[in-house]
Image: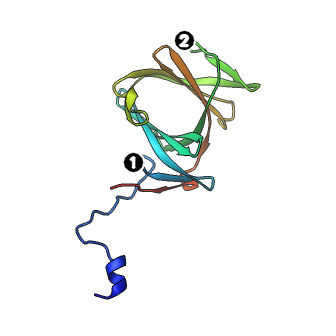
């Protein structure tokens, strides 16, 4: 065995990280979006009946975005940022944000599994509502966490726009 092979060879018993998809991202993975590398620091798995979708908290410095991933009839991905939007329950059928009207697409109650920075949400429920503008080019996501209501603004992206590097096996 040569000198370089000692440094660059893998231990045959060392596990190799599994390839990730947007539906199998884990805490500690790196997601590259829009030429920026983000660390996955939180993950929320939502379950409403038999339907399941994911929210990944991505952090780069002080910048936090959320990657939403769900497999409906086809894979649907979105990038979201928290916004200030004064709402209360029951959620309205129409919401205006920055002069644009958004229309209720779906709402319900989901049980939550939280990981990483979202671990404190483990086992809770959220009432959610999803809105879209007329062109479905922009979205609003509303979630209640106890007495607090959080709002996020987002837009759809395509799978090719992100790259995932596994941070663990």
The C terminus is located in which quarter? Answer: bottom left
Relative to residue 123, is residue 42 drawn left or right? right
Front residue of this view, candidates 106 and 159: 159
The vertical placement of 82 against 166, above or below, is above
Residue at x 35% of width, y 30% of height: 50
Residue at image mark 1: 24
SS for callout 2? loop
SS for callout 1? loop
C-alpha distance separating marks 1 and 2: 32 Å
Q: How is the image coloured?
A: rainbow
The vertical placement of 33 against 49, above or below, is below
| Quadrant housing residue 160 | bottom right
Percent across and percent down for residue 124 are 37, 22
Percent across and percent down for residue 33 are 58, 52
Residue at image mark 2: 89
Mark nearer the N terminus (1 vs 2): 1
């Amino acid at each position: 065995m040569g000198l370089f092979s000692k440094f660059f060879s893998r231990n045959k018993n060392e596990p190799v990280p599994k390839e990730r998809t947007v539906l199998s991202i884990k805490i500690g993975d790196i997601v590259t979006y829009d030429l920026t590398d983000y660390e996955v620091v939180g993950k929320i798995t939502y379950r409403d009946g038999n339907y399941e979708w994911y929210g990944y908290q991505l952090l780069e410095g002080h910048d936090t975005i959320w990657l939403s991933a769900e497999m409906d009839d086809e894979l649907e991905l979105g990038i979201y940022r928290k916004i200030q939007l004064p709402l209360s329950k029951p959620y309205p059928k129409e919401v205006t944000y920055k002069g644009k009207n958004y229309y209720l697409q779906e709402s319900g109650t989901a049980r939550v599994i939280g990981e990483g920075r979202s671990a404190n949400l483990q086992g809770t429920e959220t009432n959610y509502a999803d809105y879209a503008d007329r062109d479905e080019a922009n979205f609003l996501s509303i979630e209640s966490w106890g007495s607090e209501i959080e709002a996020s603004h987002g837009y759809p992206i395509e799978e090719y726009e992100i790259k995932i590097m596994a941070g663990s096996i």
